[in-house]
Amino acid sequence: ERVDVALAAVNNALAGGMGWGDLEIMIREETRAGNPVAGTIKSLDLANNKITVTLANHLDDDEDDEDEEEEDGEDEDKDGDEDDAGEGDDEKSSERKRKQQQKKLRRKRRKAVAVELDLSLSAYANARTHFEKKKKHATKHDKTLAQTERAVAAAEKKAKADFARVRATAKGEATKTRETFWFEKFWWFVTTENCLVVSARDAAQTDAMLKKYVSRDSDAIVHADVAGAPLTLVKAPPGSSVVGGGGGGG
C-alpha cells in the first residue's frame, strides 16, 4: 500500500508540473518531517520514468523466527538444568542477555532492500515484473548450472579415459624388455672405427669367451702375460677384418 501511495505521490507531483529538482527537495523535506511514504523513496530516475524505494526484507523472517523459537526452547531447557544444578541467577541472567543481543543483531542484519519501480505501473504490476525477472534469472541460472555440471562430468570422463589409455600404453611399453646382447655381460665398448671391444671380467668369462665368441679369422685377441689378466677381444665390423688379427702377448 505504501508503494502505491509513493508512486501516486510522485506521479501527481509530476502531473501538476512540479520540476524534478523541486520534487527531490520536497521528498527530502518530507522525509525529515517524518513522512513514512517519503521516507521509502530512496532516489529518483525520472529520465527513465523510474524511482527507487527501500522496502523491509521479510523473506527470511519466518526462518529466523523458527531459529529463535528453537533457541528459546534450548534456553528454557538449560535454565531448568541450571536450576536443578543449583547454579546462580547471575549466570543465567548473563546468558539470557547474550542471547537477546544476538537476536537484536540478527534483526539489524535484516536490512531494507532497494527496489526499482516503474512509475507507469502499479505496485502489483511492478512486483509481478520483478517476480518474472527473478524467475527468468533463476531458470537461466539453473540451466547454466546444469550445463556446467554436464561439461564437468564430460571433462572428468575424458580425463579418466585419457589417463587409462596413457597408463595402459605405459604399462605395455614397460613390459617390453630390450633384448640383451651377448657381449653386455662382459666389459665392452665400441671404437670410433666401429670395432667392438670386449673384455672378460674374470677367468670364467675368459674361458667362455674363448669357447663361444672368438672368431680366429677376423677377431683380434689381446692378452697380457700376467697371471689373472683378463682376455680382451676386438671384433671387426661386419665385412672387414682386424688388422694384425691373431693371438699374441703384449
Image (cartoon, helix red, strand yellow):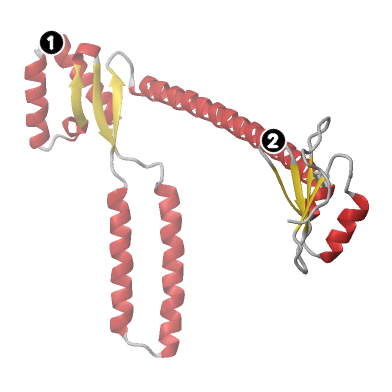
Element type at mark 2:
loop
Q: Residue furthest bottom?
A: 86
Picture residue at 32% right of the left edge, 46% below the top? 110
Q: Where's residue 92, x and y in %?
A: 33, 79
Q: Secondary structure at mark 1?
A: loop
Q: Quadrant of residue 168?
A: top right
Q: Nearer the viewer, residue 57 or 219?
A: 219
Does 99 sit above or below residue 217? below
Residue under circle 1?
16
Q: Position of residue 9 (x, y in %)?
A: 19, 21
Of the two numbered discs 2 and 1 in the rendering, the one whose residue sits closer to the viewer: 2
Q: As drawn, is 218 to the left or to the right of 46?
A: right
Q: Residue at x 38, y 19 (%)?
A: 125
Please say if 76 is above or below 47: below
Residue 129 image position (x, y, % from top left)? 41, 21
Foreground of the two, 209 or 126: 209
Q: Position of residue 188 (x, y in %)?
A: 73, 50
Is 143 left or right of 22, judged from the image as shown? Answer: right
> Identity of the amino acid at label 1?
Gly
Q: Identify the residue shown where x is 44% and y is 49%.
A: 62
Q: Quadrant of residue 87?
A: bottom left
Marker disc for residue 168: none
Considering the image in quadrants, where does the N terminus appear? top left
Choose the circle earlier in sequence order: 2 or 1.
Answer: 1
Q: Is residue 110 above or below residue 143?
A: below
Q: Nearer the viewer, residue 120 or 237?
A: 237
Name the foreground residue: 164 vs 68: 164
Q: Relative to 11, say whether 34 is above or below.
A: below
The quarter of the picture where the C terminus appears is bottom right
Q: Is residue 215 left or right of residue 184?
A: right
Residue 193 image label: 2
Q: Amino acid at mark 2?
A: Glu
